[in-house]
Amino acid sequence: MSKNNKSVVWLIITVVWMTVIFCFSAQPADVSTDTSLHVGMAIGHMIVPGFSEMPKEEQMDYAEKIEFPVRKMAHATEYAILGCLLTNLCLSLTMKKAYMWSWLMGSAYAATDEFHQLFVPGRSGQMTDVMLDSVGCLVGCLLTCLILHLVKNMHLSKPAKL
């Protein structure tokens, strides 16, 4: 695949992922809360012994207790993925300091995303979420850097074929 084609592919995937983030942020607060509670219930079924046999009220109490960490992990995870995508996009364009630009773009998107939430019913823009998203993006950028470094070193350390 040519360099231009790779850049276009990374750009498309990145824009699609940014659209996914935007759509989650556009959900009204009650819809977002329901999603988080469903995830909390699924986590309960996976990791809490006997969760299925618990009364529904206890199951819901568990889901409500972990709703906040579920939301924050979702923030960090979606932006870690964005950081990975932005880093690959920047590297495909051979930008100098690609990792820094990737993190800055991801952080800027996080800020605009929180601003967008100011206009969504029941939602609010939180500076703490911008910081959490930025850290998630940084983790994604660094993880991509580490993986690419390891792949490059594995490639260079292969013995020559005779």
Image: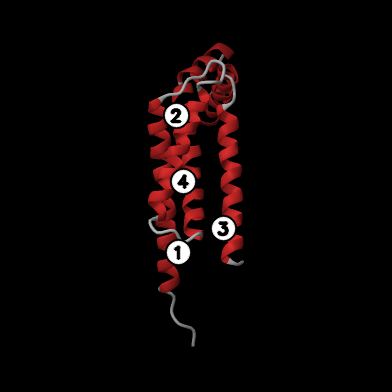
Other-residue count near label 4 (Cα within 10 Å), few / some / many at <14 / 14–19 / ≥20: many
105 or 142: nearer the viewer: 105
Q: Which mark is residue 72?
A: 2
Q: Secondary structure at mark 3?
A: helix
In the rendered image, the vertical position of residue 121 relative to residue 130, given as above or below: above
Q: Secondary structure at mark 4?
A: helix
The span from disc 3 to disc 2 (Cα, nearest Å) is: 31 Å
Q: Are marks 2 and 1 in contact (CB under 8 Å)?
A: no
> At x 42% / y 24%, what residue is drawn?
126
Determine if residue 49 is in view: no
Q: Residues within 10 Å of mark 1 (few under 14, many from 20)?
A: few
Q: Amino acid at mark 4?
A: Gly
Query: Which image quarter holds the N terminus?
Result: bottom right
Spot occupied by residue 97 in the image (x, y as percentages of width and height): 38, 56
Q: Could you tell me the amino acid type at mark 1? A: Val
Which residue is tagged 4?
A: 83
Viewer-nearest of labels 3 and 4? 3
Instruction: Identify the mark nearer the N-term, 4 or 1.
Output: 4
Sequence order check: which comes first, mark 2 or mark 4?
Answer: 2
Mark closer to the chain start, 3 or 1: 3
Residue for badge 1: 151
Direction from residue 14 to residue 160 in the image, left or right:
left
The kind of residue on which mark 3 rests is Ser
Q: Is residue 57 left or right of residue 126?
A: right
Which residue matches tag 3? 7
Badge 2: residue crowd in 10 Å (few <14, some 14–19, many ≥20): few
Q: Quadrant of residue 96?
A: bottom left
Tell me what residue is drawn at x 45 percent, y 64 percent: 151
- Please name the residue shown 52% across and 24% down the image: 117
